[in-house]
Amino acid sequence: MRAFIFLAALLCGLQAFAANHCDLSEPTRYVDVGEVRLAYQSIGSERDPALLLVMGLGGQLIHWPDEVVERLCQQGFRVVRFDNRDVGLSTWRRPAPSINLPYEVLRYRLGLSLGAPYHLRDMAGDALGLMDRLGVDNFHVLGASMGGMIAQHLADLAPQRVLSLTLVMTSSGAQGLPAPSDALVALLARREAGSREAALQQQADLLAALGSPSVHDDRALLLHQAEQAYDRAFNPEGVQRQLLAILAESSRVELLNRLNVPTLVVHGTADPLLPVMHGVHVAAHIKGSELKLIPGLAHRFQDAFKEPLLAAVLPHLAAHRGDLGLARL
């Protein structure tokens, strides 16, 4: 009986400790990785297994919902989120490469090679360099959208270091998969705005278009989210370069076929940007992977789907964390 009481007290103490050390107000820090200076935030104990979050096109580290990050941390993970090169507070140490996006998009539509200034594999190298600078040898990876594409390369670059892979609303990049509508692609590529107000309206339009048809979006909330991102950092040219890196990428099917990392693929049935067959195709080409489809989920972390997403992701992470949850004892 005493042993039971002690164990119960210990577990309660661990839960309380987890809640206390998951401080979302941790400052943004910076590391130099090659020619890029990356902005990142590390939340949780350095003694816990690390979970690297990789965001999608144009997304900043703040686009990982705080409540989701906190829940992941409370499960006993050190959560590292960062700004990919060319967005947020991450900057170039040298002048950023210039591009002519309309010209390159025309080449893409004609089936010609693109002159992308960098590629998704380079962005995976950034993420790997960040973990090197943090002194983290092994870690879990969770990538969303373009971040899931980067995560695929990361697991291929360092398979011995990636403990588990979680791919959310992403794609293999294979030919023949369903494409988004031209209207949505136009919204995604539209980055010219003559004023702050125009930029906020454009971003709110995009967020609405990426949302689930089963959820009513409050326009004021969308504008507030757009305002938070704009006021932290606004770099439309950087987003265009990221888009070009995606367009320049060939199919990753061969890469996926050689992955041997515990993998969970999560996709929504209402995704307007990467329709559900993109997720099905990714899972079909990763040996031993698990596929979870979430009804109604589109291409955003909307409040209505945070719990279903966590319900899908947390068991996978728990099954592969490797320390039985006792890392901080």
Image (spheres, rainbow, N blue to C red):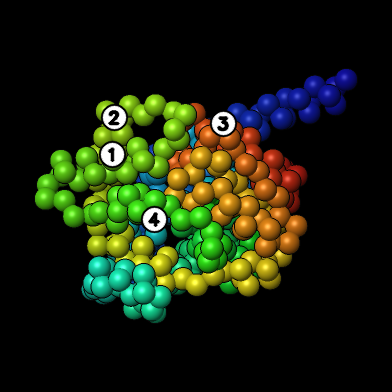
Mark 3: secondary structure? helix
Identified by mark 2, the residue type is: Arg
Mark 1 or mark 4, earlier in chain: 4
Mark 2 or mark 3, earlier in chain: 2
> Is 201 on the left-hand or right-hand side of 280?
left
Above or below: residue 96 compared with residue 292: below
Identified by mark 3, the residue type is: Glu
Nearest to the observer: residue 175 or residue 286: 175
**At x 68% / y 68%, what residue is drawn?**
257
As measured in the structure, the alpha-carbon distance from the residue carrying label 2 to the one carrying label 3 is 23 Å
Residue annotated with mark 2: 219
Mark 1 or mark 3, earlier in chain: 1
**At x 16% / y 51%, what residue is drawn?**
193
As measured in the structure, the alpha-carbon distance from the residue carrying label 2 to the one carrying label 4 is 22 Å
Q: Are marks 3 and 4 in contact (CB under 8 Å)?
A: no
As measured in the structure, the alpha-carbon distance from the residue carrying label 1 to the one carrying label 4 is 15 Å
Residue 192 showing in the rendered view: yes
As measured in the structure, the alpha-carbon distance from the residue carrying label 2 to the one carrying label 1 is 7 Å
Residue annotated with mark 3: 307
Residue annotated with mark 4: 57
